[in-house]
Amino acid sequence: MDAEAAKTFIGRIWEDEVIPELTRYIRIPNKSPAFDPDWAVHGHMDAAVAQFERWARGKIAGIEGATLDVVRLEGRTPVIFVDIPGQGDDVVLLYGHLDKQPETTGWTEGFGPWEPVLKDGKLYGRGGADDGYALFGALAAILALCDQGVAHARCAILIEADEESGSTDLPAYVEHLAPRIGAPSLVVCLDSGCGDYEQLWLTTSLRGMAGGALRVQVLTEGVHSGMASGVVPSSFRILRSLLSRLENETTGEFRLPEFYAQIPPDRIDEAKAAAAALGENIRAAYPMVAGMRAMSEDPAELILNRTWRPTLSVTGLEGAPTIVDAGNVLRPATAAKLSVRLPPTLDAEAANRRLKALFETDPPYGARVTYEPEAAADGWNAPPLAAWLRIAVDRASHAAFGRDAALTGEGGSIPFMGMLGKKFPDAQFMITGVLGPHSNAHGPNEFLHIGMGKAVTLAVAQVLADHHGRA
């Protein structure tokens, strides 16, 4: 592949088509089913699928034998399946998703989840980087090869609409499409992150996730705090004590050894190498308030914390009025939504069962305590990179950035990867993405770094070319 020619081709298609399409896509509030149970009635998901379908059909029209299907299994979110013929019997599976997280608060004035803003080489709005660009990037990479007549394997592109809800619909689709997908020797996932925007980053592990709603009730109705306090224990205090069963509130470390896993030596080495490459940028990637310190002074330990160690985040609270509306009332109940990130190799369902027993057994003061688990997602630890892929990703990173690729784990979850790892144990994985410093997936001011999107597209094209040419 002529990398410079491919860079020009990809840059043009991004500027002329991808950015305008993603701008339109950001305006669609197609929240994932977990956040919009009536998604089918509202029609936003169908609108996003229809937009992606129109663009992709137009792009594959000139490729002989290429097909596109919007597949709909009853009661499930749809998937887009694009099948592009290649040379030989091999197949590459390219994956992404188009469903979105909810709005959240805290967007800068003039920005918003459904209001696309292009500024300083970044496209702000919900879903562009996570993960709307994936279909456009994958197809643009393949088209760049077609433009030069470069041989590649058959490419199957699968775009789902349930990833932000845990990919609960995806196993049924993988089984349904199995005869058409075949047995991929390479899986390319564009839904991950990057340590910076200066090189290609490969994800070598993903944490699992458990969690749910923890509720504490002490009264049937609120009571004057002066009358009740000292007699009736606070539901918040009980909630706080229950969380302390799991987590050391001073250090953030988990108290239970069964939530930890042995970190493989090669992942420790990767964390040290990534820390050396990023240095202070590991901390600078987060919008900490002035004077705030990270959980460790050692950058490698911070990377291992967010990739191989369990952590607890309280992502939602119920039962408390706003401060301005809070009277002198001892509230009847407090509830918290918990997000527990797990080591890549831990059983997530078993972790949720352990959490339920931990919180509900012997509740303080006999309070009514319930833990309602949500769908759990196992993590994933990648197989060792084949020699050809290690060479190919460095070559791709040099083509796009002029530097070697970097390898690291990610703190988030992509349920599809664990599923594919079990189904295709001999496959190689190229897991990458554009979610770098301050891109803020799921939060306010989420953005897609346009330059990184173009560079990742070029890197995928190079790897696809080298995959076909491998010995």
Image (tube, rainbow, N blue to C red):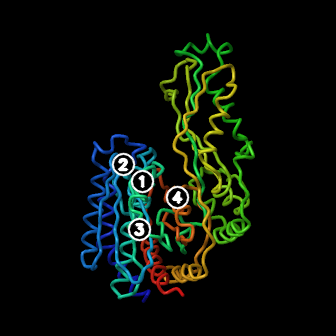
Question: Which element carries disc 4, helix, strand or loop?
Answer: helix
Q: Is residue 213 above or below residue 460?
A: above
Spot the residue most to the front. Answer: 179
Query: Given the image, on which type of amino acid does mark 3 rest?
Result: Ile
Disc on res. 76: 2
Q: Are marks 2 and 1 in contact (CB under 8 Å)?
A: yes
Of tags 2 and 1, the one toward the viewer is: 1
Q: Is residue 2 above or below residue 371?
A: below
Question: Which element carries disc 2, helix, strand or loop?
Answer: loop
Query: Given the image, on which type of amino acid does mark 2 rest?
Result: Arg
Q: Are marks 1 and 3 in contact (CB under 8 Å)?
A: no
User: CA separation, marks 2 and 1?
Assistant: 9 Å
- Residue nearer the viewer, 199 or 420: 420
Q: Are marks 1 and 4 in contact (CB under 8 Å)?
A: no
User: Which residue in the structure is indicated by mark 3?
Assistant: 181
Of tags 3 and 2, the one toward the viewer is: 3
Residue 286 lies in what quarter of the image? bottom right
- Residue nearer the viewer, 100 or 87: 87
Disc on res. 419: 4
User: CA separation, marks 4 and 2?
Assistant: 18 Å
Query: Given the image, on which type of amino acid does mark 4 rest?
Result: Met
Question: Where residue 325 sits in the image (x, y, percent)?
Answer: 48, 24
Question: Which element carries disc 1, helix, strand or loop?
Answer: helix
Query: Given the image, on which type of amino acid does mark 1 rest?
Result: Ala
User: Which residue in the structure is indicated by mark 1?
Assistant: 172
